[in-house]
Amino acid sequence: MLTDEVWHRANKTRLAPLSTIYYFDQLIDHENPSLGTFKQRYWFNYQQYEPGGPIILMNGGEEDASAFTGYLDNQTITGVMADKFNGAVIVYEHRFFGESNPYPDLSVKSFRVHTLQQSLDDLEHFAKNVKLPMPGGDQVAAPGKAPWIHVGGSYPGALTSFVMHNKPGLFYAGYASSAVVQALADFWGYFEPIREHMPQNCSADIQAVITHVDSVLASGDAAQIRTLKDAFGLADLQHNDDFAAERTFAAADVNMRAVMSPLQSWQDLQPTSGPGGIFYGLCDSLEVDGAGRSAGPQGWGLQHALSAWGAYTKSRVAAQCGKTDIESCLSTYDTVNPFWTNTTVNNWSRSWQWLLCTQFGFWFDGAPKDTPTLVSRTLTPAYSQRQCVNYFPEAFNKSAPVNFLTALDVNVKYGGWNVTTERIVFLNGERDPWREATVAAKGVSNKGTDMQPHLLADGFHVSDMLMADGQVSAAIGQVQQQALQYIGKWLADWKPSA
């Protein structure tokens, strides 16, 4: 919890509580300013600031930014930057997330201005025009009056790269953690770091079960398919792709998206994570027998794993679906389900899905044939594309629909893996499931330079953003310090301009 006791380091004056919300009048449509403005939220801390110090903007990205106010203090990389370089920190809320909404609903009509370019234009308008709530706060506009640093992790990390590529000079430097800079429609690579770094026995048994599942589903034998589904408590789930997806995505995925599946919960792991999490709960269910013995590296084999995973899933689905029938609970084919049609604001899932459907893709699916896979190959990008229609039928069912995917356009326009922007540091983790969409992806030719360093540690997703992870992992701590050294060197060269 943020303290109300905040004092300026140098002059000892008491400042506003860090939980204070500030508002900026942001343009609804940068292509048509006559449409007016909306209230964009931000949070601010200048307790370390001294004139000439950097303005550090932490972008909240695809979530309610009130969840990121911890980035105002020195438990996080942004707070440490402020402390080290005498800077001020902004936590900034992205349009159509949290309470920063240009329109009062999340309809397709409103989403006409929910584009990547509009979000980058927001950053420009904010950095050039905001009057920050501190003495001299109207004299630090970007780009010439103060060095601004854009910081983000995951999608906001990609925004660091995108805005510096699209608007050269606006941000003097950037810190991009787990930055998913390469839009990918067919994103089977999400599961590769998981497969590589999870317990070997668990990986072997999951692959064995998935191979069996795909064989049965491909057979077309209705009796065998029903018997297989019944082993997981899903005999009444009508569509095979929904059944395959339940191996990957959350139970009650349609109605309770916030509940992570075991595989996806890998994304929540950090070096500070202890035992007992969702991911290792699945592996323990598969690899520890009734006598408490653990399987060797090859696992227990198909029959044990199938039975154990089935029992685990039955319990999980029962807890999530309760008395709701399985088809109503898990089917993605019920297009009148309120999950698809709810357009109330502060619904991060809907706002994010719009960006996935129209800009990025990032659709999780099975690996190509002859490549080991943790995920059923029954799942293809078409499974996610169909859900785009469920969410946004007005956009995708008309004669001139929004393109399903403009990933190639995004990569060309904003640089993708091949961005050449200088004074941006990319930090990634070997165990990050999003690694293959970052500059640390296997086979990427851009290896970085001294002006665009690429730093890799043993972390998970955005591990380097939290100082505690650097205390647990020496490798993460090292890249954090390296990044700070690069930024310090660049700041030493900054000079104001007219």
Image: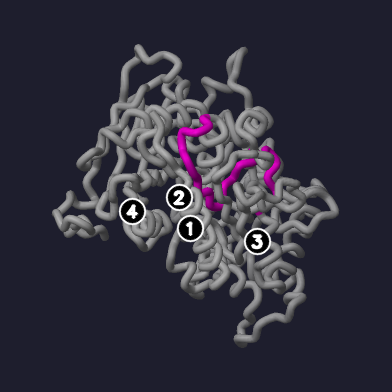
N-terminal of the two: label 3 or label 4? Answer: 4
**Residue corresponding to mark 3:** 194
Mark 3 touching mark 4, by CB under 8 A? no
- Residue at 40 percent across and 55 percent down: it is 81
- Residue at 70 percent across and 41 percent down: it is 186
x, y percent for residue 310: 63, 64
N-terminal of the two: label 4 or label 1? Answer: 4
Disc 3 residue type? Answer: Ile
| C-alpha span from label 3 to label 2 | 40 Å
Is 322 displayed left or right of 457 in the figure?
Answer: left
The circle drawn on residue 86 is 4
Disc 2 residue type? Answer: Ala
CA neighbours of label 2 inside 10 A, class few (<14), some (14 to 19), many (20+)? few
Nearer the viewer's eye, disc 4 or disc 2?
2
The circle drawn on residue 484 is 1
| C-alpha span from label 3 to label 4 | 39 Å
Magenta segment includes 371: no
Q: Residue furthest right?
A: 370
N-terminal of the two: label 3 or label 2? Answer: 3
- Residue at 69 percent across and 70 percent down: it is 305
N-terminal of the two: label 4 or label 2? Answer: 4
**Residue corresponding to mark 2:** 492
Nearer the viewer's eye, disc 3 or disc 4?
4
Residue 14 appears in the picture as rendered: yes
Disc 1 residue type? Answer: Leu
